[in-house]
């Protein structure tokens, strides 16, 4: 996804992926709307600080620098994998810099 190759990324995402982000910033239960959402966000590359793997679960702790907002967000992402595909993602970060009006 960081390469913006959403066609290739689709191969690694379950059809019925469950995605939950911070309240008000999106949740999805199907792959196509989720991938369209990611494509629209045009996210910068994440600087992965730590990765934890436990059986079918992967947790990433990353910094993501949003130059336009002059914000670096600490992001926690929990991925669950079934049958070689990501079946659920939960993302947690402080959304206030992105939702508050200036």
Image: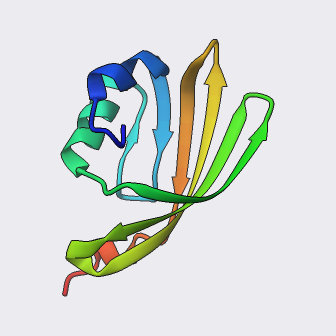
- Furthest toward the right, the residue is 54
Q: Quadrant of residue 98?
A: bottom left
52 sits to left or right of 22: right
Q: Nearer the viewer, residue 16 or 46?
A: 46
Residue nearest the observer in this picture, 6 or 93 = 6
Q: Name which residue lies at 45% across and 71% down.
A: 73
Residue 82 in the image: state x and y as whole percent: 64, 18
Which residue is found at the position 60% from the left and 38% from the top? Answer: 79
- Which residue: 63% across, 25% down? 81
- Which colour scheme appears in the figure? rainbow
Instruction: Pick the quarter of the image with the C terminus.
Output: bottom left
**Is residue 25 placed above or below 88 in the rendered structure?**
below
Measuring from the top left, give residue 31's x and y in whole percent. Answer: 37, 24
Q: Is residue 32 left or right of residue 81?
A: left
Seen from this angle, which residue lies furthest top?
83
| Quadrant showing the N terminus | top left
Could you say where residue 71 lies in the image, as x and y percent from the top left? 35, 78
Q: How many marks?
A: 0
Image quarter of residue 35:
top left
- Residue closest to the far bottom: 102
Please tell me which residue is depicted at 54% across the width and 39% down the height of the picture: 89
Q: Position of residue 51 (x, y in %)?
A: 68, 50
Q: Quadrant of residue 6?
A: top left
């Amino acid at each position: 996804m960081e390469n913006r190759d959403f066609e290739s990324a689709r191969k690694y995402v379950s059809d019925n992926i469950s995605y939950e982000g911070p309240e008000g910033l999106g949740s999805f239960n199907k792959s196509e709307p989720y991938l369209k959402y990611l494509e629209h966000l045009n996210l910068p590359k994440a600087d992965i600080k730590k990765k934890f793997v436990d059986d079918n679960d992967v947790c990433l702790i990353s910094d993501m620098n949003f130059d336009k907002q002059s914000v670096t967000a600490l992001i926690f992402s929990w991925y669950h994998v079934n049958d070689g595909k990501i079946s659920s993602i939960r993302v947690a970060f402080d959304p206030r810099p992105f939702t508050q009006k200036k």
